[in-house]
Image (spheres, helix red, strand yellow):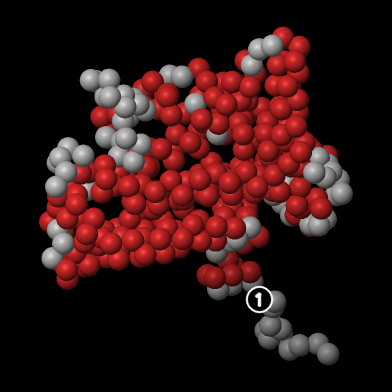
Amino acid sequence: MNHPMGIQSNPAPDSSFHSPEASAPVHMKTTRPFYWSVRRELWEHRSIYIAPLAAAAVAMLAFFVSLITLPHSMRELAALDRAHQPALLAQPYAHAGMLLTLTAFLVGIFYSLDALHGERRDRSILFWKSLPVSDLTTVLSKAIIPLFVLPVIVFLLAVVSQLTMLLISTVVLLLRDGGAATLWKQLPLFEMQLVLLYGVTVLALWHAPIYAWLLLVSGWARRATFLWAVLPWLGIAVFERIAFSTSHFGLLLKDRLFGFAAGAFDLKTPSGAPVDPHLIPLSQLAPGRFLSSPGLWLGLLFAAIFIAAAVRLRRYREPI
């Protein structure tokens, strides 16, 4: 039907009259693949935080048992030379930090051995590879667990545990009139926690090639990852010992495990007396010597090589 002259049909709505919400540019929220990859590791590997929590619980339980004899121990302590009191008071607090540090090291080893092997074993690698997350991001998110996440967990748990121990000790000593003032004056807890923070940082840097090697083996081996990770190095050490009657390679392995102490700390006072490991003064830290150590930088170089090889392996490795 023809419309009368001067009367027009309603035209289609002009796009220029759309609402501001419709015409506004769409801003996609950043997905942060690395952040969510780390969160995925924490979700899938609960031992990362459960094992340190269990270690802290064991330390606290042992501490509660020791409270029975705490007032008597404080009276005996008061009879000793004041120079020896801080180290004796620091022992239970230092033992808690050492237990947490050892636990984190063991968790880091077994986590690294399973990090890439586990997703190949349960074939979940096929799902994760379908996501827009690069192999580099995936491997780095796994490497950061023993190198950063575990040290942070250890330090925070140690601080909370030690502060709780100090407060409970104070209450017990106040109730029994057993020397709470001596405890607060002679225990340098804040200094101990600074040394612990320095120590877990040193350990993470020094052990970086160990964790990176375990990640590489985890991405390569089809089974028995622990044996593949350990036996080649032990075989080289045994071969050297039998063939040449020397132990240079074995000493190199020992240094990679325990050599951080000599490089990062002055283990003797200026007078030549050994430093008590339960209470290392801030003056005995040697960060400059540690950071200038060739062993540290060679280790970090090998760690980077192992991680790069693990990234390439994951790119082409199939499920088991």
Question: Which residue bears the numbered disc 1?
Answer: 13
Q: Is residue 162 visible?
A: yes
Q: Position of residue 61 (x, y in %)?
A: 41, 64
Q: Residue at x 62, y 38 (%)?
A: 211
Give residue 9's quadrant in the image. bottom right
Q: How many marks?
A: 1
- Residue farthest top in this picture: 244
Image point (40%, 27%), residue name: 264
Residue at 55% x, 31% y: name it. Answer: 257
Name the residue type under label 1: Pro
Depth check, front residue: 191 or 296: 191
Look at the picture and state if 49 lies above or below 202: below
- Give how far across and how far down residue 298 sits, in percent: 57, 21
The residue positioned 68% from the left and 83% from the top of the image is: 10
Q: Is residue 277 left or right of residue 300?
A: left
Query: Image quadrant of residue 274?
Result: top left
Q: Is residue 265 left or right of residue 137?
A: left
Q: Tag 1's secondary structure?
A: loop
Q: Nearer the viewer, residue 114 or 246?
A: 246
Residue 28 % position (x, y): 59, 59
The answer to which of 42 and 247 lies nearer the viewer is: 247
- Mark 1, other Cα within 10 Å: few <14 / some 14–19 / many ≥20: few
Q: Quadrant of the N terminus?
A: bottom right
